[in-house]
Image (spheres, grey):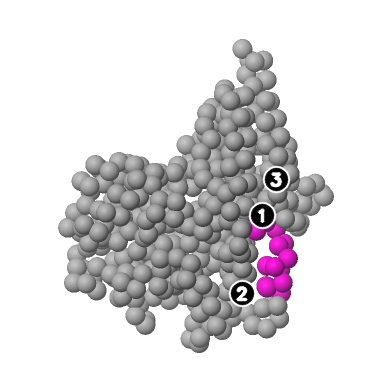
């Protein structure tokens, strides 16, 4: 018999009742160190006092009005995102996939607005993840997400990860833009070299294409910069964000330059819930913390030490950990044992992490994680790795 909750997830048999900073507390009172952060969402951990205050204050005033009226919190958050980035304008959504949908529609509209309605195709990369709507599964191009859902939405051409020659060959008179994650998250924490992103920027400029970045997972401080593309020194024309910007409240945004957004006039796009006052109060509160002087510097410093400790664990357990990948607090352990089993071993040691493609376990602590909590995490990861070594020795 089907469960009342549509069974599209295979869930761990664990439910949480509350959270405190970097910890989740289960119904039975047991504490777990949360290095999954709700899949890179809880950027400021759980029950952050500033976020709790912001949402509580707003909840007592006004939740929703619709986009038929001005929303001052939206104007404020948009102005702050514009001031902090390459962008001139922002559309607010409820999720990452919707932010990507806006980015895809905007890219096509840009070309048609500029007299090229034939240019509607977008080039994407193998291993990409852009969401679960019909267009974003087509963009991601992963067979396991497309299977059984009818014809794949047209307009996406996929090339091998990091293959510049294949990318150049894929550019056709119908190409409108290139879409890429600066670090593939779901794909296994696979960073795109800065050099490659710079080459994409140059190709887009040369061929009149738009560069679209999916920073849904990498954005809002996750890599130690406000946005991951800052590491490469390139700017996109359009960028989708979500996850961290809401700190756990469902929201996303599509940021763009004035040039890229030129065709998106009144009536061309919309969302009933997107950018409602409750979401905007939280988004602004997240930025208060992330943009505060020294915050991102602290993320970079903590990450550097943490990555060194992870590299030491890799040296100690080469039969279990093959590679440490990633930037900032978006880290991945490429494993020589099944990642699902390793994640389960971590969970047994009360450390939560998230699986990813390419047999990787993602380590995504809250950006507010303390040094002591990072050390606690290292101890759990080391103990889990040692348990796999012991199993291997027993089998040999
Ligand atoms: C999570 C994610 C998405 C999809 O976001 P949803 O909020 O689940 O729709 C898109 N792109 C990337 C890179 C993501 O990590």
Which mark, by number, is residue 281? 2
- Measured in 3D between alpha carbons, the distance from the residue under mark 3 to the one under mark 1, in whole angstroms, is 10 Å
Figure quadrant of residue 286 = bottom right
Q: Quadrant of residue 380?
A: top right
Location of residue 115 in the rendering, given as x and y in whole percent from the top left corner: 18, 72
Furthest-top residue in this view: 396
Judged from this view, the residue extending furthest toward the bottom is: 69
Which residue carries the number 1 mark? 368
Whichever of callouts 3 and 2 sits on the residue coming sooner in the sequence is: 2
Instruction: Name above or below for residue 167 compared with residue 17.
Output: above
Q: Main secondary structure of the magenta part?
A: helix
The quarter of the image holding the C terminus is top right
Examine the rendered structure and indicate whether residue 81 appears above or below residue 191: below
Q: Is mark 3 within 8 Å of ligand 1?
A: no
Query: Dot 3, how many residues are within 10 Å of its Cα: few (below 14), some (14-19), or many (20+)?
Result: few
Q: Relative to 326, does residue 386 appear above or below in the rendering?
A: above
Q: Residue at x 60, y 51 (%)?
A: 299
Residue 164 placement (x, y as % from top left): 27, 43
| Mark 1, other Cα within 10 Å: few <14 / some 14–19 / many ≥20 | many
Q: CA distance from mark 3 to mark 2?
A: 29 Å
> Residue at image x 44%, y 62%?
240
Q: Label for residue 371?
A: 3
| Residue range of the region highlighted in magenta in the rendering | 44-56
Which is nearer the N-term, disc 2 or disc 1?
Answer: 2
Circle 2 crowding by C-alpha within 10 Å: few under 14, some 14–19, many from 20:
many
């Amino acid at each position: 018999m089907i469960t009342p909750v549509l069974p599209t997830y295979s869930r761990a048999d664990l439910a949480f009742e509350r959270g405190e900073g970097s910890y989740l507390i289960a119904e039975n009172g047991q504490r777990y160190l949360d290095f999954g952060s709700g899949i890179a969402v809880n950027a400021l951990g759980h029950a952050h006092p500033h976020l709790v205050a912001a949402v509580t204050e707003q909840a007592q005033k006004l939740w929703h009005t619709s986009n038929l009226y001005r929303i001052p919190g939206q104007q404020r958050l948009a102005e702050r995102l514009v001031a902090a980035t390459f962008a001139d304008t922002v559309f607010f959504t409820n999720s990452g996939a919707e932010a990507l949908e806006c980015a895809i529609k905007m890219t096509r509209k840009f070309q048609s607005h500029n007299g090229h309605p034939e240019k509607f195709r977008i080039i994407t990369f193998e291993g990409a993840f852009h969401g679960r709507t019909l267009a974003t599964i087509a963009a991601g191009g992963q067979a396991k997400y497309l299977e059984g859902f009818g014809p794949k939405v047209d307009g996406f051409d996929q090339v091998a990860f990091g293959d510049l020659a294949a990318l150049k060959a894929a550019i056709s008179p119908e190409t409108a833009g290139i879409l890429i994650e600066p670090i593939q998250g779901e794909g296994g924490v696979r960073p795109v070299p800065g050099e490659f992103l710079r080459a994409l920027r140059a190709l887009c400029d040369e061929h009149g294409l738009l560069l679209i970045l999916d920073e849904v997972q990498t954005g809002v401080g996750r890599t130690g910069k406000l946005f991951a593309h800052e590491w490469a020194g390139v700017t996109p024309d359009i960028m989708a964000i979500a996850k961290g910007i809401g700190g756990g409240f469902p929201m996303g945004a599509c940021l763009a330059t004035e040039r890229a957004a030129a065709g998106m006039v009144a009536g061309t796009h919309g969302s009933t819930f997107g950018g409602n006052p409750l979401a905007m109060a939280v988004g602004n509160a997240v930025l208060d913390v992330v943009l505060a002087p020294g915050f991102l510097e602290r993320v970079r410093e903590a990450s550097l030490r943490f990555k060194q400790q992870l590299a030491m664990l890799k040296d100690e357990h080469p039969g279990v950990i093959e590679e440490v990948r990633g930037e900032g607090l978006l880290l991945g352990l490429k494993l020589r044992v099944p990642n699902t089993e390793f994640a389960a071993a971590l969970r047994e040691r009360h450390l939560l992490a998230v699986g990813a493609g390419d047999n990787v376990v993602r380590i995504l602590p809250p950006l507010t994680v303390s040094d002591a909590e990072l050390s606690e995490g290292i101890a759990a990861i080391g103990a889990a790795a040692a348990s796999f070594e012991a199993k291997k020795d027993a089998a040999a």
